[in-house]
Image (cartoon, rainbow, N blue to C red):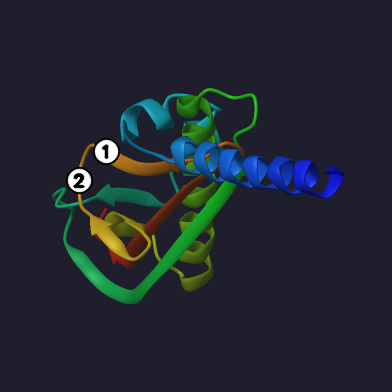
Amino acid sequence: MKKLILIAAVSAGMLLSAVSAQAADRTLMLPVAGALAVNDAQGRLGDSVRFYFGDQRTPKVLEKFGGEKTSQRTNAFGKSDEKACNWVFLSAMLHLQQRAQDLGANAVVNIVSNYNNVEHASATEFECHVGAIMAGVALKGEFARIAK
């Protein structure tokens, strides 16, 4: 009898955890401008590298340095979805900035959301995925030296 109760309890626990984990996965489209307005994003990113999302017009591209993908995650536990997403977006942007600087680029162009290698191009929004304990943003961009 004890084995039967134990098996039933374990089975119920597994079923409930699978349902709650699946229900916690959310896809959000959030404004780039909003994410750049918090967490001292503008101060931390500075102005040495310019960022252009989607099909935003850029100054003349003088040289291209290839592209790169970045997929960043952050702890979302106890944070609002927006707060966690804005934080992880900044992490992704800092990664792209550092890579641009390493290559001698002064811009990252054609930045698109690239979650699970599915592109979503927008000049104004980025895609964020939030679960029960983690939030993630994946971006893809091309590095360039642009005219000033």
**Which of the 4 quarters of the picture holds residue 74?**
top right
Location of residue 103 with respect to 35 vertically, above or below: below
Left-right relation of 134 to 106: right
Secondary element type, mark 2: loop
Instruction: Locate residue 39, reporting x and y percent.
Output: 55, 27
Q: Is 124 in front, or is 50?
A: 124
Left-right relation of 110 to 42: left
Residue identifier under label 2: 122
Q: Amino acid at mark 1?
A: Glu
Q: Is 111 in front, or is 121?
A: 121
Mark 1 neighbour class, 10 Å CA radius: few under 14, some 14 to 19, many 20 or more:
many
Residue at position x 57%, y 49% from top?
73
Secondary element type, mark 1: strand
Instruction: Locate residue 3, reporting x and y percent.
Output: 82, 49
| Marks 1 and 2 close (CB-CB < 8 Å) | yes
Residue at position x 50%, y 63% from top?
101
Q: How many marks?
A: 2
Q: Is 34 in front, or is 138?
A: 138
**Which of the 4 quarters of the picture holds residue 68?**
bottom left
Q: CA distance from mark 1 to mark 2?
A: 6 Å
Instruction: Locate residue 29, reporting x and y percent.
Output: 30, 36
Left-right relation of 6 to 101: right
Location of residue 62 with respect to 3 vertically, above or below: below
Q: Is residue 33 visible?
A: yes
Residue at position x 35%, y 76% from top?
65
Residue identifier under label 1: 125
Left-right relation of 62 to 5: left
Q: Is residue 46 visible?
A: no
Instruction: Locate residue 110, reporting x and y percent.
Output: 24, 58
Q: Is 31 in front, or is 143?
A: 31
